[in-house]
């Protein structure tokens, strides 16, 4: 019941916003935040009460249904989304001050929340596919927000890629449904698929990886992301930062480990292709981040690279790899939301958004820069912080997979770590050691108020705690990744 | 969790205390330094307590930081942790003077304490994973030392430092990943057993890159002569004296545990050590900057230690002497560099200059400084009676013993004999550059500022003087009573190094051969010094003769990194456009096929027509028209020409009425011909005929 409620709540909120259209920006924000919070509470309630009983929404045919159920993976993902989304919403409020069109934006924003949760709850391939498509549609309006020529161009490109991806995903889905008779997800692979001819299964798996990976910006379907990043809209950062891109990763994990099954694919050429694509995406994202002078877009590229870390873990097709990937998914969410918030604070408070402009900023924003430095160290993977732990888990899993691609993966992870160090540490160090360009900065301190400081402090505390006490999360992962 | 928490506390207390020290100095920076001294003293007390009561304690914490933590307190580790702490304490006390007018003492205290905790943790670690974690924290936390002055030179050196730290750390990590499962978290003493039957050469070499970079081993020593001099003197002492030893610790782990019995790996360490030893001394002779000379000297001394480590690995059974020499030289070098860098610190904080030309004669009439510097310089040069002689003799003796062993087995010992000579010559070079510094500081006179220098009586405060003189007094103490101290140090470290007892107990430190070896070095050193005076110096000044071509950083590493980045960009650019190109290509191909299928029907019918209804196409003659068109055309043309002349426009060729009319006439004629041949024309004519017939009938 809670599942249905948490999917419906943001929809209702969005519908309310579309009908009501409050003139007052504040009212819109309060309304949005209230519904978002309510939804998150519903999700948390569902998680805590183990409210995982299945709900069937629609019966398309006798065995083709649209239905929800909460399992371990869904629990992890929906929990993460439920924590991140309200934070991202808070962050969006500040951003949207410059953009306008709040009602429109937050309406679709809540719709996306609903769709993401539905993907997390999906019990079978059909449900996931339906909501995956709906998520593409509802985020389209976020990408196009602003409706200038650039935005529309970005939106069109986004749509091409999403629809193309969905088409591939559809083929993959139909294969699964055909051979499994519309069965539900099952960890280790739906048994019915084992009888399917591998000459069909393997290409379909690759297609599914590409299709669902398009949202996670996996090479070669990543090109929508830079384009969306070029459009000067704050939305892209939001989109890249949080759960929308992670929905793509989640869908790939669902498909590979819960529909096809790791045993079916392991060791085949399909696995090699997917691994290589993930590796290419990692290097690509990191290289682009090094080249990008705009802080926010730099982080967006970094997200792309980090999402592929997760995909890499998933595509190793071993429990250890999946565990490492999921660990990184959670940790990266914490690190990235912190980094985005810091950069956002700098942009909002001082109007500076390029790496060169942030030099020496530690004098004016000691708090924000301290948090930024800490999160950057985590992301680079300096031991013993969380980024290091998840990368370690990934690399160990990669080496233990035993073939040359595993070793290559480790090498790529390390190269990417060097690049991460370059693109994260150089601005951080610059902020402390380089002289400040004082133009336009008269006040002594530009640190934001407590509303922004408090979430950041909480996030930092969470990261420190996770650094030293990571066993509960590990145990939880071991609970469903066997 | 298993074992004693005291080890964990020893490693984490400074890290936890660091923010407190930083916060203490928010208003008044001196309080940070004072807090740092206090915390370091507490840490030292804790370690001493551990040394006297808790020897042999172990700690394992599964799941800590993901993989679990493993620490152990045996003789070598506690000893070195204590030495580290003493160094931190002395430099902190000295720092009260040195950093009195500093711009960021709080930051210095913060990172110094974090580095301290990490270093203690590193020396107490008992698994490669634990060591790696502490090593990385140490590398990262020591970065602010190098960047402390925030001048362009310092920033550049710090950038190099960071690159080396990050890349070295990651290469090391790669090596750790390549180890078979379970080895990264195994105790050091289990490593050699676990390594049985595996070829770990690649892994060990990769791990060596990380440790070697920190130690300053050739060819990744490049950052060291740049980074150490630009840091504050107190930090330079720690960087040179302590952080390099962290690298050496890693080499010990690799050579004596992981790659135990692998002669080729020991050879690698040995020869890299030989090169480093010579190269460092060579650079030091040419250096004209006080601190850079000391940094190069560090390189050279690390080379000596590496030779010791290599020798230990080479002679598996008779490695007692080499093991003793290694640990003794590690300790000695820490001590010498502490004293020497702090002396350089005195110079820097009083006259803010480090170039040898500018500091000439600074030390005159400063007995305390003179005493300390002389002892440390003579000690590092291996003068008998001081501690450096003891450790160098043992290192030399270990090498000689290996050569004997080779001769005994009738093996070719020539390379090692050459290495032995390089060892002796490098010892002489040490004496040479140390004498150079000593003479420059304490005997030469500054041409203009000598009176000013002589007048500086309060060049350091009382606590600093006590700390420095006390540190310097240890040198002769160790050197004169080696059987008490040096043998003890060696024996403490034996279990860690897996070393056998030396042949002769007690070790004959002052035997005939050792004294002869020292004498050889001294004679070579004096000869080199005069050569240096004659050829490198110029009338008592120190012209810049730094061999720039030896700078691998600017000639190799930086271009290489630039190339890497460029390749990365090229790749990213390619990846960026690949899909777009693919889409364009797909569109083109699709369009082609669409057009193809579009016109297939037409094309088919055309082909059929061409095949079955051949059409003879004659070349059409150019229409000439008839008389009428000719005449009218000519007339119109002349009118147009006239009009053009009137208005001054040019006659365009398109309005050539004669040919236009001719073409028109031709077309009209063709059309008419076609019309007259058509069925409808026939019908039409038929109708006309009918009508004419009708009319005729009606009229008639």
Image (cartoon, coloured by chain):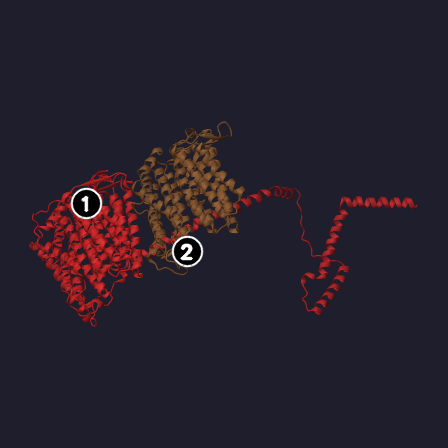
Q: Quadrant of the C terminus of chain B?
A: top right
Identify the residue at the far right of this view.
B700
Give the camera-side residue of B544 and A295.
Answer: A295
Identify the residue at the far bottom of this view.
B448
User: Considering only vertical position in the picture, is B277 above or below B364?
Assistant: above
Which residue was labeled with disc 2? A350
| Chain B visual colour | red
Categorize mark 2 by other alpha carbons within 10 Å: few (<14), some (14-19), many (20+).
some
Letter of the chain shown brown in the rendering: A
| Real-space CA distance between mark 1 and mark 2, rounded to the nearest whole angstrom | 56 Å
Residue at 16% of width from left, 52% of height from top?
B331
The image's mark for residue B442 is none
Left-right relation of B270 to A144: left
- The image quarter containing residue B191 is top left
The image's mark for residue B256 is 1
Left-right relation of B239 to A258: left
């Amino acid at each position: 019941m809670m599942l249905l409620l948490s999917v419906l709540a943001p929809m209702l909120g969005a519908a309310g916003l579309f009908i009501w259209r409050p003139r007052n920006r504040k009212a819109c924000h309060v309304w949005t935040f209230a519904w978002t919070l309510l939804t998150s509470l519903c999700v948390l309630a569902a998680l805590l009460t183990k409210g995982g009983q299945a709900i069937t929404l629609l019966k398309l045919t006798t065995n083709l249904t649209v239905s929800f159920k909460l399992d371990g993976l869904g629990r992890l993902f929906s929990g993460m989304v439920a924590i991140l989304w309200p934070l991202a919403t808070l962050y969006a409020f500040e951003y949207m001050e410059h953009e306008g069109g709040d009602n429109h934006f937050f309406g679709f924003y809540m719709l996306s929340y609903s769709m993401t949760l539905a993907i997390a709850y999906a019990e079978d391939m059909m449900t996931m596919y339906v909501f995956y498509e709906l998520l593409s549609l509802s985020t389209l309006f976020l990408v196009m927000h602003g409706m200038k020529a650039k935005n529309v161009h970005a939106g069109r490109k986004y749509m091409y890629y999403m629809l193309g991806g969905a088409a591939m995903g559809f083929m993959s889905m139909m294969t699964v449904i055909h051979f499994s008779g519309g069965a539900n997800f099952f960890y280790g692979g739906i048994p019915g698929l084992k009888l399917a001819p591998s000459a069909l299964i393997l290409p379909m798996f690759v297609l599914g990886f590409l299709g669902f990976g398009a949202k996670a910006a996996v090479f070669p379907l990543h090109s929508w992301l830079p384009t969306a990043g070029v459009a000067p809209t704050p939305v892209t950062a939001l989109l890249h930062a949080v759960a929308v891109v992670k929905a793509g990763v989640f869908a790939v994990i669902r498909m590979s480990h819960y529909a096809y099954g790791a045993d079916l694919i392991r060791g085949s050429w399909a696995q090699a292709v997917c691994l290589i694509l993930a590796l290419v995406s990692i290097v690509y994202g990191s290289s682009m981040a090094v080249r990008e002078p705009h802080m926010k877009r730099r982080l967006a590229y970094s997200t792309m690279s980090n999402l592929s870390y997760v995909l890499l873990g998933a595509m190793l097709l071993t429990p250890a790899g999946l565990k490492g990937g999921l660990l990184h998914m959670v940790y990266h969410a914490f690190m990235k939301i912190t980094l985005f918030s810091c950069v956002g604070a700098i942009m909002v408070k001082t109007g500076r958004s390029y790496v060169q402009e942030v030099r020496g900023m530690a004098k004016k924003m000691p708090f924000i820069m301290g948090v930024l430095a800490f999160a950057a160290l985590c992301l680079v993977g300096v031991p013993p912080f969380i980024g290091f732990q998840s990368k370690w888990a990934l690399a160990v899993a990669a080496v233990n997979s035993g073939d040359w691609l595993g070793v290559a993966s480790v090498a790529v992870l390390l190269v990417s770590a060097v690049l991460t160090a370059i693109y994260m540490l150089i601005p951080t160090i610059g902020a402390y050691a380089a002289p400040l360009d004082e133009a336009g900065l008269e006040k002594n301190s530009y640190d934001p108020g407590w509303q922004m400081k408090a979430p950041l402090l909480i996030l930092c505390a969470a990261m420190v705690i996770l650094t030293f006490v990571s066993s509960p999360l590990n145990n939880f992962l071991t609970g469903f990744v066997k | 969790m298993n074992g004693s928490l005291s080890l964990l506390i020893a490693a984490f207390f400074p890290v936890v205390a660091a923010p407190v020290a930083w916060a203490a100095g928010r208003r008044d920076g001196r309080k940070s330094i004072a807090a740092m001294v206090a915390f370091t003293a507490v840490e030292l007390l804790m370690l001493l307590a551990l040394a006297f009561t808790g020897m042999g304690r172990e700690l394992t914490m599964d799941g800590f930081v993901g993989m679990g933590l493993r620490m152990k307190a045996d003789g070598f580790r506690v000893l070195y942790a204590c030495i580290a702490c003493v160094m931190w304490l002395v430099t902190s006390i000295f720092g009260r003077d040195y950093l009195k007018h500093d711009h960021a003492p709080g930051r210095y205290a913060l990172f110094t304490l974090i580095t301290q905790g990490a270093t203690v943790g590193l020396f107490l670690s008992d698994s490669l994973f634990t060591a790696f974690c502490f090593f990385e924290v140490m590398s990262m936390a020591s970065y602010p030392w190098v960047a402390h002055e925030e001048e362009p030179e310092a920033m550049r050196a710090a950038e190099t430092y960071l690159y080396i730290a990050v890349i070295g750390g990651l290469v090391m990590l790669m090596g750790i990943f390549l180890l078979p499962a379970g080895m990264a978290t195994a105790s050091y003493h289990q490593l050699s057993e676990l390594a049985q039957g595996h070829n770990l050469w690649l892994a060990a070499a990769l791990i060596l890159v990380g440790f070697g970079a920190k130690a300053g081993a050739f060819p990744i020593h490049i950052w060291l002569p740049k980074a150490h001099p630009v840091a504050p003197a107190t930090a330079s002492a720690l960087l040179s004296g302590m952080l390099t030893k962290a690298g050496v610790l890693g080499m010990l782990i690799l050579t004596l545990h992981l790659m135990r019995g692998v002669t080729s790996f020991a050879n690698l360490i040995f020869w890299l050590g030989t090169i480093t030893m010579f190269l460092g001394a060579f650079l030091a002779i040419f250096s004209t900057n006080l601190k850079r000379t000391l940094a190069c000297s560090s390189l050279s001394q690390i080379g000596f230690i590496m030779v010791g480590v290599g020798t230990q690995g080479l002679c598996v059974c008779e490695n007692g002497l080499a093991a003793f020499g290694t640990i003794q030289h590690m300790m000695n070098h820490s001590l010498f560099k502490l004293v020497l860098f702090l002396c350089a610190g005195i110079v820097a904080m009083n006259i803010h200059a480090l170039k040898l030309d500018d500091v000439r004669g600074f030390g005159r009439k400063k007995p305390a400084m003179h005493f300390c510097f002389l002892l440390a310089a003579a000690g590092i040069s291996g003068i008998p009676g001081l501690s450096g002689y003891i450790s160098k003799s043992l290192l030399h003796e270990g090498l000689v013993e290996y050569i004997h062993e080779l001769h005994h087995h009738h093996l070719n010992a020539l390379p090692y004999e050459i290495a032995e000579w390089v060892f002796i010559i490098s010892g002489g070079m040490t004496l040479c550059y140390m004498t150079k510094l000593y003479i420059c500081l304490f005997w030469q006179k500054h041409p203009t500022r000598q009176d000013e220098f002589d007048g500086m009586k309060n060049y350091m405060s009382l606590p600093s003087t006590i700390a420095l003189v006390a540190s310097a007094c240890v040198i002769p103490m160790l050197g004169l009573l080696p059987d008490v101290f040096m043998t003890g140090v060696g024996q403490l470290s034996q279990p860690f190094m897996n070393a056998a007892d030396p042949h002769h107990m007690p070790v004959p430190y002052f035997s005939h051969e050792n004294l002869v070896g020292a004498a050889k070095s001294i004679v070579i050193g004096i000869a080199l010094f005069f050569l240096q005076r004659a050829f490198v110096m110029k009338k008592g000044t120190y012209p810049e003769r730094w061999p720039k071509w030896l700078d691998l950083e600017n000639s190799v590493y930086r271009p290489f990194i630039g190339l890497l980045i460029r390749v990365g960009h090229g790749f990213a650019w390619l990846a960026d456009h690949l899909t777009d190109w693919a889409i364009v290509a797909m569109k083109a191909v699709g369009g082609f096929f669409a057009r193809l299928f579009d016109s297939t029907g037409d094309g088919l019918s055309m082909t059929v027509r061409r095949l079955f209804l051949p059409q003879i196409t004659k070349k059409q003659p150019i229409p000439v028209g008839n008389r009428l068109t000719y005449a009218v055309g000519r007339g119109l043309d002349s009118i147009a020409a006239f009009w053009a002349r009137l208005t001054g426009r040019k006659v365009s060729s398109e309005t050539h009425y004669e040919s236009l009319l001719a073409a028109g006439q031709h077309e009209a004629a063709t059309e008419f011909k076609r019309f007259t041949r058509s069925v409808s024309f026939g019908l039409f004519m038929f109708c006309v005929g009918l009508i004419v017939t009708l009319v005729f009938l009606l009229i008639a």
